[in-house]
Image (tube, rainbow, N blue to C red):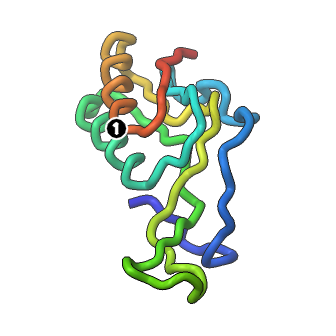
Amino acid sequence: MLMPKKTKYRKEHKRYHSGKASSLLKVSFGSYGLKALEGSWVSSRQIEAARKVITKYTKKGGKIWIRIFPDKPVTKKGGEMPMGKGKGAVDHYVAIVKPGTVMFEVAGMDEATSKKVLDLAAYKLPIKCKFVSK
């Protein structure tokens, strides 16, 4: 699972995904990409599930780039905890994805295969996505 090796602060305030992306807008490394159409938090488990699907279909012919990284800690308190008693422990990490962000890129495959692979990966993500080319 993806997570930062070290963070400056253990816990973070909630940051939301308002506004459009200002970076990661174009397909830079590969030939085809998967672009987010809406904003959301994408957990490290969801990124890993999408990566596994892409890896399964690319075999040794293609190359993959993951352009997002889960660096925001999300805390959770135990069940049946009373109000108060502070903030919960870090449960998992998420990446903040804004509309227009290119999340995954692939190269070394034809367009039809790339579209199929990235559509399968988009199914694993909690947001609407679009297939884009360079």
Q: Position of residue 81 (x, y in %)?
A: 44, 83
Q: Position of residue 106 (x, y in %)?
A: 44, 28
Q: Amino acid at mark 1?
A: Lys
Q: Nearer the viewer, residue 96 or 87?
A: 87
**Toward the viewer: 38 or 53?**
38
Q: Position of residue 54 (x, y in %)?
A: 32, 34
- Up-down: is 42 above or below 31? below
Q: Nearer the viewer, residue 56 or 39?
A: 39
How crowded pointer 1 is (Cα within 10 Å; few <14, some 14-19, many 20+) is rated as some
Q: Residue at x 47, y 27 (%)?
A: 128
Which residue sits at x=50%, y=62%?
A: 93
Task: Tell me if residue 101 comes above or below residue 72 in the rendering.
Answer: above
**Which residue, as the protein is rendered here, is positioned at the far bottom?**
85
Could you say which quadrant of the image residue 37 lies in? Answer: top right
The residue drawn where x is 49% and y is 42% is: 66
**Element type where label 1 sits in the image:** loop
Q: How many marks?
A: 1
Q: Quadrant of the N terminus?
A: bottom left
The C terminus - image quarter: top right
- Disc 1 target residue: 124
Name the residue: 64% across, 25% down. 26
- Residue 114 sits in which quadrant? top left
- Tell me if 8 is positioned left or right of 103 in this view: right
